[in-house]
Amino acid sequence: MSENPLSRRGFLGMLGVSSLGALLAACRPATSSQNTGQFTAQKVESASTTTNDSGGMDHQNQSGGADDMDAMHERGLKMFPAKTEGLGGQPLAFKLDGDVKVFEITCKEVNWEVEPGKRVKSMTYNGTVPGPEIRVTEGDKVRLIVKNDLPQSTGVHCHGIHTPNNMDGVPYLTQPPIKPGQTFIYEFVAKPSGTHMYHSHHNAAEQVAAGLLGPFIVEPKDKTKSKWQWDKEYTIILNDGPHGFTLNGKSFPATSPLTAKKGQKILVRFVHEGSQMHPMHLHGMPMRVIAHDGYPLQYDFQLDTLDISPGQRKDVLIECEEPGAWAFHCHVLGHAESPKGMFGMVTALIIEA
């Protein structure tokens, strides 16, 4: 889904220098273990932009002087990218059974750290929010073995994938629900190519918001037929619910920056798993929209603010020409900034000279 996040020291160095060479070498891995716990749609630990006892951040509106407000904004920025436990959306390994690619998914509860000190009781695929990335090639035979360790029933819908009707993942319409302790096997041929997703379709308003979601990428059989090429790619999953406003399961300052070198092209796959509109805005340069819901556009177009509705996927290309740290955020400003500073759906595109 994305590369290891840039270190906070590296990002702070960026604020005072023009070159990112040293900071890109400072990338650090993130841990992926979580604590388990009973699910409720509420915070386990709350947080505050001023570092509190739990190390978290509080975005409640509080009055104060200009200097106090400025200090809180600066403090939050200097935490970016803040280290938290867990990294979602990482590639899911498969096993081969003849010519079938077999992926194993377990639905389970964890306490997911959204930002420093803020943990939310979550429903997950394989213990992360978002769930692991499933990536295959168009025409591959795919088998998903889904085990349900949740206290409630579920079902998995591969959104955008053309499956047989009985593999569509809607309990009581196309299959029985996967009850607690049970396993269900989905089998289909991966098509069409493009950016897709998988998520719950049983008590979905609660389960998807709580973390039962993940990216499903189908590569084209022949990549040479595409007129578009890129040097790096990122997937950004938008969500809103018990975790707050998140990008890939994290809220600023715990979001991961996108990084590139001057002259590179990056592909960003936006996947909207939430229930609200999130227009994503990139400072400093346009995005070229090349695909919608996995389907290549006949006529691409450029913009700097991309409307993304629930259930949609949009692919954009960004030509990275101007070095610097560029804000990248939802332009519903209540999803991104408060008197306490930036939060929620905020990250940065960092371009090395």
Image (spheres, grey):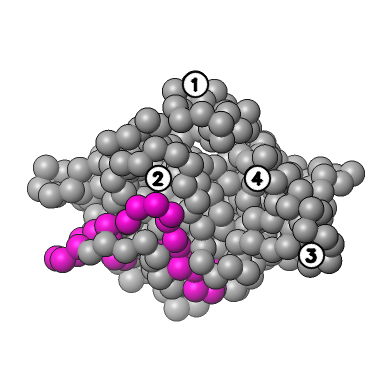
Q: Amino acid at mark 4?
A: Leu
Q: Amino acid at mark 1?
A: Ala
Q: Which of pointers 3 and 4 indicates the residue nearer the eye? A: 4
Most extreme residue toward the left, as rendered? 225
Most extreme residue toward the right, as rendered? 53
- Residues in magenta? 271-300
Q: Residues within 10 Å of mark 4 (few under 14, many from 20)?
A: many
Q: Nearer the viewer, residue 326 or 170?
A: 326
The residue wearing badge 4 is 77
Image disc number at residue 22: 1
Assign the C terminus to one quadrant of the image.
top left
Q: Quadrant of residue 179?
A: bottom right
Image disc number at residue 260: none
- Labels 3 and 4: the sequence-earlier one: 3
Q: Is residue 102 left or right of residue 107?
A: left
Q: Nearer the viewer, residue 279 or 246?
A: 279
Q: Quadrant of residue 191?
A: bottom left
Whether residue 185 is visible here, answered yes or no, is no
Q: Nearer the viewer, residue 44 or 115?
A: 115
Residue at screen point 32% across, 63% down? 303
Is residue 216 depicted above or below 82 in this figure? below
Percent coordinates x, y for residue 257 in the rendering: 51, 42
Residue at screen point 58% across, 68% down? 333
- Labels 4 and 1: the sequence-earlier one: 1
The residue wearing badge 3 is 60
